[in-house]
Amino acid sequence: MASAELQGKYQKLAQEYSKLRAQNQVLKKGVVDEQANSAALKEQLKMKDQSLRKLQQEMDSLTFRNLQLAKRVELLQDELALSEPRGKKNKKSGESSSQLSQEQKSVFDEDLQKKIEENERLHIQFFEADEQHKHVEAELRSRLATLEMEAAQHQAVVDGLTRKYMETIEKLQNDKAKLEVKSQTLEKEAKECRLRTEECQLQLKNLHDDLSGRLEESLSIITEKVPFNDTKYSQYNALNVPLHNRRHQLKMRDIAGQALAFVQDLVMALLNFHTYTEQRIQIFPIDSAIEPISPLNQKFSQYLHENASYVRPLEEGMLHLFESITEDTVTVLETTVKLKTFSEHLTSYICFLKKILPYQLKSLEEECESSLCTSALRARNLELAQDMKKMTAVFEKLETYIHLLALPSTEPDGLLRTNYGSVLTNVGAALHGFHDVVKDISKHYSQKATIEHELPTATQKLITTNDCILSSLVALTNGAGKIASFFSNNLDCFIASLSYGPKAASGFISPLSAECMLQYKRKAAAYMKALRKPLLESVPYEEALANRRVLLSSTESREGLAQQVQQSLEKISKLEQEKEHWMLEAQLAKIKLEKENQRIADKLRSTSSGQGLGLAQENATGVNAAGREEASAKAVLEPAHSTSLIGILTRTSDNEVPDVESREDLIKNHYMARIVELTSQLQLADSKSVHFYAECRALSKRLALAEKSKDALTEDMKVAGQNISRLQDELTTTKRSYEDQLSMMSDHLCSMNETLSKQREEIDTLKMSSKGNSKKNKSR
């Protein structure tokens, strides 16, 4: 970018320099032409000066000659004057001399005449030369003045160009300095950019690896976990629960609460208006307390008496709609089912208005036909009749649009989603129309009430009823204005809320799908609530990573554990079989012991008491031996004595000589203890062998993983080396390109400096020439 900007600046400077050079050439040519013209004029001026000097010299010589001739004429005249008296005296003698003087006089006269003519001619020539000289001098002076003006203009132009060239030179020098500074900064930026590119390439590589891993993981999860894409089809996508927008729900509930308050005010105003209209019919134009009113007004009063059953449901429907909008629901047209109820109540009220409209019009006509009605009152009644028709029409229009808005929650094909915005806009326009109609009704009814109050038959009850009707109309006007402005202010919010629905879809397909979505939303909320339980203490992340590494590198692999379990099961089965065998052996030994005890008891009865006591001790030792056989783990003698067979026999031989059976029991117990000891040693050796086998297997696996990681690291090192070499090549190429650009820039700056120095020299020469010309002109 910086090089492109520099090239653009240099191109602009080159263009300006070429323009200035062309202008300089033109100015140089003009100066040369003016110099040639001034030289020619100088030559002409010299020639004119020379001719003028010649004419002046001739004129001087002629004037000198003329003076000589004048003096000669005077002398001749003096001589003539002296000769005349002498001639008179000497007539006779001077006849001959007179003749001579007459001839001389004629000669002198001719000579004088010639001199006079020549003098006259010279005077004419001198006058003509003088006039011509003055004319030429005036022309030359005017030409000199014009040339001086042109020279001054040219000097001003030259000075302007000089200043411009100096400014251009300074500007170019400043640009040169800036460009040098910029080139240095660009070099620094280039270095920084190279470093950044290296960092970015490393980051890009890391990100690429990370993203590729994430992509593979995501694709595997999608292929394993996602059976189908439900957002592809609008029917399935409509069942997805949208993101919960609590702010939207709170705002919609707030708007619904404001609308409920406005509808309550409007309902109260309509109830008062219909009720006070019923009271007015009872007292005007005929008071029902004095005489019965007409059957038409009776029917009209009966219908008006039922207004609460049609107006109150509007408030109830709006209340139900407000209660249906909660923080946990999704509020769109497809889910606002209660809007249909409000539309039905509004339709019933429209039917009520249509039912009472003919009676109202006939009642106004009846008022106009009464004797108390004036022309102004009749005009007001006609205006009110038109206003009532307009109000009914406006309510019908409003009911139509609200019915259209209620269609998406009941009939999905009844209203296209693209028409939601236009319907909402028309609802706002209908509300403003309703406000305008109610204002007209209030205005005309106030005029009518004023006229009726001026009637002589106006009662206090009529005045009070009219005031109540006017107050209800004022309340109705205010309520209509508030609800119209409220709807207009929130129209953008209503239109924006239409897009609140399933993700990546145009909206809910049908009310059934919206209801299913709400059920799913409630289930999801219940599930999330059930998940809100205190979490158990988990293993820290670092410890879990360490355990994972231990598990990956431990000996307890799946196959090894399976083999260990299989071997353990086989050993357990063998041990169970041996246990059953030894249990049978123990039962047989018990039976033998009982028989032996019985035999010994029989012997004791036949022997003496001393011998019986010894036998009893022998029986007690036999019973203890049998108990030790049942325990199988405690079947050893006391640890203070030797457990070997020789030691037992030696100990027993020291005390007393046992019989054969007690010796067999001792031998049996010794071998049982030995078997138990050998089995425990065998189990320990088996467990150690399994442990060593599993550890060797894990070590082999770790060795294989290490070799794989080594291969992967060598590949990465190769790729990194290739990338480093490629980046070094790119760095060298970028360095060369930057050096070439800098050399080109320096060459261009040098050429510009040379051209600027040449322009300075040309400007100096022009200055010198213009100064010399101006000095010459001044000297002339």
Image: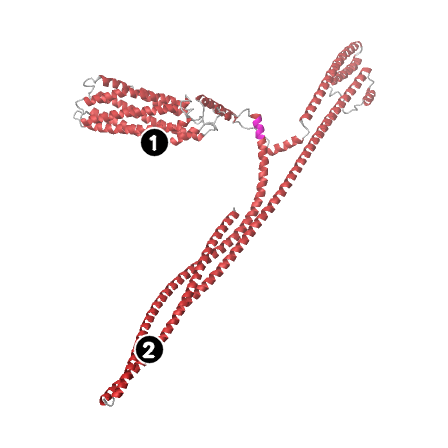
Q: Position of residue 337 (x, y in %)?
A: 41, 22
Q: Residue 207 sits in which quadrant? A: top right
- 399 vs 705, nearest the viewer: 399
Q: Tell me, for residue 485, which label it has, or none.
A: 1
- Magenta stretch containing residue 222, yes or no? yes
- Tally the marks: 2
- Residue at x 41% of width, y 65% of height: 38
The nearer-to-camera label among 2 and 1 is 2
Q: Amino acid at mark 1?
A: Ser
Left or right of residue 610: residue 269 = left
Q: Circles 2 and 1: CB distance less than 8 Å?
A: no
The residue under label 2 is 63
- 54 vs 719, nearest the viewer: 54
Left or right of residue 737: residue 575 = right
What is the magenta range?
A: 217-223
Q: Amino acid at mark 2?
A: Thr
Q: Residue 308 sits in which quadrant? A: top left
| In the depicted structure, whether residue 57 falls above or below residue 233 | below
Q: Position of residue 654 (x, y in %)?
A: 83, 21
CA gap, disc 2 and disc 1: 118 Å
Q: Tell me, for residue 411, which label it has, or none.
A: none
Image quadrant where one finds the C terminus? bottom left
Left or right of residue 746: residue 411 = left
Mark toward the start of the polypeptide (2 vs 1): 2
- Magenta stretch containing residue 507, yes or no? no
Number of residues whose C-alpha sits closer than 10 Å to that of mark 1, classed few (under 14), some (14–19) or many (20 or more): some
Q: Main secondary structure of the magenta part?
A: helix
SS class of the residue under badge 1?
A: helix
| In the depicted structure, whether residue 392 falls above or below residue 126 | above
**Can residue 372 be spotted in the picture?**
yes
